[in-house]
Amino acid sequence: MRRALLLTGLLAALAPEAQAWPAALMEALGRDARRLLPRSLARLLADREREVLEETRRFPTELAQLMAADLSAGRLRPETVAAIDAEAERAGELLRQQRVSEGLVSLGGLMRIPADLADPVLTAGPEGYPPGVVAEYYAFVSASLGKMPVVLDDPPALEIARRELPAYWEGLVERSRRQSRVIRTELFRGGRVVDHRRIDYRSPVYGVASLSYSRAVTAIAATWIAVWRDARGDVTRRPAPRLVAPREGAPPQPPAQ
């Protein structure tokens, strides 16, 4: 036990700069993901928002370590996928047992999984980022959130079955990994970290942030719906996403200020 505690402390000391969506962004992700849910489920999770956010912070340490190692490597190992799937199955089983409140909090806490898998910061590779880059990236996302359009990243994802979630989760990692290099290139120049206040919507960082945020929102909703449907939850009265298409010949417009 003493060796295990010492090893855990050593890993924490050697870990790179904290890499996870900040609490305020997790709250925003949950809020936006609920907009894609059946009304009954959206209301039930909204009523338990505080407990759900606390559940994300109680994420199993062993699973978090497995995910962190695999995200750094750029792919999920079978044992990690199995552990993630078991966490989703636990939430579904609580709901099937009619332990509704407990099951809903467990279901809500699953948002940590797709949120992390959709975050390009976590797939930077074993070298990570230079100190300060992660903080500036998240500061940019937080400051720009009101200007970013939240889009349905992958409409068919909201229809996937519970058994299809592992393959879907693995796909998220690959898409995130392709974007991680942009963050390093744009936020660390000439040996110095770029202040997020010097970046605007014309920067590739804006594109990465906007796409990854929408990808996380969609993935959270897809995970919730698949587990809820599998537990025989009500999936009626789902909102219809609004289709927005640019007008032909219209000049590109900057985000609303």
Image: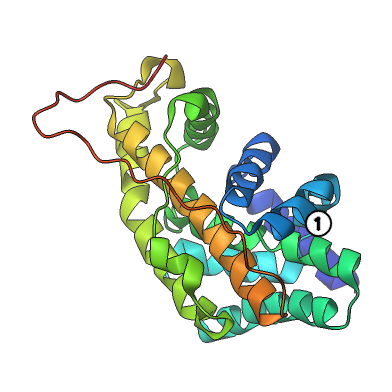
Vertical placement of 11 versus 159: above or below? above
Image quadrant holding the C terminus, namely top left
Q: Residue at x 14, y 23 (%)?
A: 251
Q: Residue at x 52, y 85 (%)?
A: 78
Q: Nearer the viewer, residue 65 or 99?
A: 99
Q: Position of residue 149 (x, y in %)?
A: 42, 35
Where is residue 62, by image quadrant? bottom right
Image quadrant holding the N terminus, namely bottom right
Residue at the extreme left = 249
Q: Say whether residue 36 is left or right of residue 56.
A: left
Q: Nearer the viewer, residue 24 or 7?
A: 24
Q: Position of residue 102 (x, y in %)?
A: 89, 67
Where is residue 123, by image quadrant? bottom left
Q: Residue at x 77, y 79 (%)?
A: 90
Mark 1: few, some, or many residues within 10 Å (few <14, many ≥20)? some
Q: Say whether residue 151 is left or right of residue 85.
A: left
Q: Secondary structure at mark 1?
A: helix
- Residue 51 seen by the camera: yes
Q: Say whether residue 189 is left or right of residue 69.
A: left
Q: Position of residue 95 (x, y in %)?
A: 81, 76
Q: Position of residue 191 (x, y in %)?
A: 34, 28
The amino acid at mark 1 is Glu
Residue at the extreme front = 237
Question: Across the whole image, how many numbered discs are drawn on residues?
Answer: 1
Q: What residue is disc 1 on?
A: 55
Vertical placement of 138 versus 67: above or below? above
Q: Say whether residue 137 is left or right of residue 238.
A: left
